[in-house]
Image (tube, grey):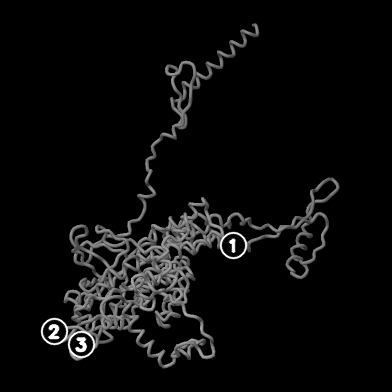
Amino acid sequence: MSAKSKKKSGKQASVAAKQAVAAKLPEFEPLQASFASDADYPTTRRRRNVVAITEREYKYKNIEDGLTPFTCDKNYNGESYYSLHEIIVLCQKAYWNYGPLRNITELKVDFSSTDIYLKGSTAKIRKFFQAWFNKIGLPKLSSQFFREYYRSGNVFFYPYKAKLKESDLRSLVKLYGGKTSTASAILPVRYIILNPADIQVTGALSIGNNQVFYKRISDFELESLKNPRNEADKQVFDSLSPVIQEQIKSNGAGVLIPLPMKDISYIAFCKTDYEPFATPPIFPVLEDINYKLELKKIDMALSRSVQNSMLLVTMGEKADENGGGINQNNIVAMQKLLENNTVSRSIVSDYTTKAQFINPDIGELLNPEKYTIVNEDINTSLNNILVGGEKFANQKNKIDVFIAQLEQGRKVFLNEFLVPEMTKIAEEMGFEDSVPMPYFDEITLQDDVSMLKVYTRLMELGVITPEAGLEAINSGRLPTSEELLEAQKGYKKARDDGFYEPLVGGSNRNETGRPSGTKGIPQSTKKIGQIGSGESVADMEFDLEKIAANLSLSGKLDILIKKKLKSKFKLKELSSEQEALIPEIKTLVVANSTPDKWVENVEVFCDRPVDNNKERVSQIFDVAIKHQIDTFMAAILFASKKQ
């Protein structure tokens, strides 16, 4: 047979073998590849990835397996109720046991709980509410509110009220002003915050406002109600319905007390109407915290495994025709030698002995990189600004968002709790004037040197008293016109008595004319400070509220000017020389235009920084000479003069 015939015969045998194998196997198509038929592609065949177009069966499984914070059950009356007990307890335990969460929560509390001051109404009514703030311990109460607000997101205020006697009520009305026809008044004298883990709600959720809140009785409270320790416990027990009293006496397990919602203030964190409760703000990060704690436990277990290191000693040699092998007596002798700590420090052996420590390789397992993603998720969710290693711009943005979040919480505390409570008290006391508005001291993380200079200069000019100036330096808050007038009366009396005297020229304040022994200078015929309308600088009066408003407005000009200069020079950051132009341009803007034109004139003076209102600038120079102040402060005073 020729070679050609043999090759053809072998090829036919191979084809026959493949057909035989294919006949025994079922027809199938690979999962990751499919082939087009020869009819579709007569000359070529191509593959396609089936996985790329396969529809996943459980594409949202991780989301579907997520927890719903609200649990539903039935109470002793057979009513369906919603509760946050399990989630609130988890959030509380995370706050107690996870240091970073506690730190960022307390940071929010510390920045939010600043001092509260009042504006508006009359001085007597403000003094009354300030005394009430001291009575209820408002600073401590606000700290407790923000702690619960940022931890569980559900805050329930329960008031303890006291009934004023007729004589006490008359004394208060006479002292602080008011008009009441009742013989007594009931005022809250203390507030406590209830544990939201013990609160349940029933009733309609989406339509109307028919929710009924219940408080679960704890074991400690149950014992106090069963066996009252004082008169207050007995009064609480007597105020309950007979059904609840019977349940407390019989068993007490799962007893729910309906809360008087007409007295209780409920504040929720980002709650919609159809939700029975607000979801705790730290609830979404609980799983990440649990995962990180689990990683730490694994690392601690691996660290303990270091003590399991072994010393491997290899002795002897391979046996051959000349002898060698393992000498058991030598091994026993070496073991005894190593048991002696003193001797084992210096061992002399032959070339057949080899010793090495076998340590667990835990360096890779203890690598901190595995914490990177979970730490980023936790810090982002908690808006943690205490994380370093970031660019200044990013860190500043995080701080701005952080402060904005705190400002929102502070508004909630004032508008949803404090103002309504003050309104109720004003109605009870019969105050005819409007209720004063409470404000928190401003949150600031910047050391504004320019504003400190302004406050110092206002004290030097006597516009504000030293006490008000120090308060402004500490809190950034200037007194109102009414407070300023009241303080100036005492300040003037103290100056007349010789207090607050400057070291230079203070004792000669009553002297008039030129000091003795000095030669006269020819007086100019032009009267300094004469203004076109006939008003002189000496006759000008300034409005403190306008000064504060204009100073605040001028503070915004720095940012606008800096932004305009960056755009003009096409720079990301200004040089020190260009930064020095900002105060000069701001002075031009303030001196050449009225406050309502300052913002729109920023671009004008950035493009051409020269005076364009000579008459106004001349008048401002007169004010500067009269009061011995710089041009900028003179422009502020000129813009703040009384009409």
Tell me where residue 254 appears, x and y as whole percent.
26, 70
**Residue under pointer 2:** 181
Give the residue at the far bottom of this rendering.
Answer: 497
List the residue tagged with mark 3: 169
Give the number of marks.
3
* Up/down of 17 relative to 304, above or below: above
For label 2, the SS is loop
Q: Are marks 3 and 1 in contact (CB under 8 Å)?
A: no
Position above or below: 53 against 535: above
Q: Amino acid at mark 2?
A: Ser
Tell me the kind of residue under disc 1. Answer: Ser
| Amino acid type, callout 3 | Leu
Closest to the observer: 483 or 236? 483
Residue 537, quarter of the rendered image: bottom left
* Disc 2 packing (10 Å; few <14; some 14–19; many ≥20): few
For mark 3, give the secondary structure.
helix
Image quadrant where one finds the N terminus: top right
Distance between mark 3 and mark 1 Cα atoms:
69 Å
Q: Are marks 2 and 1 in contact (CB under 8 Å)?
A: no
Q: Earlier in the sequence, mark 2 or mark 1?
A: 2
Q: CA distance from mark 2 to mark 1?
A: 76 Å
Around disc 3, counting alpha carbons within 10 Å, would you say few (fewer than 14), some (14 to 19), or many (20 or more)? some
110 vs 275, nearest the viewer = 110
Q: Give the SS element for disc 1.
A: helix
- The residue under label 1 is 303
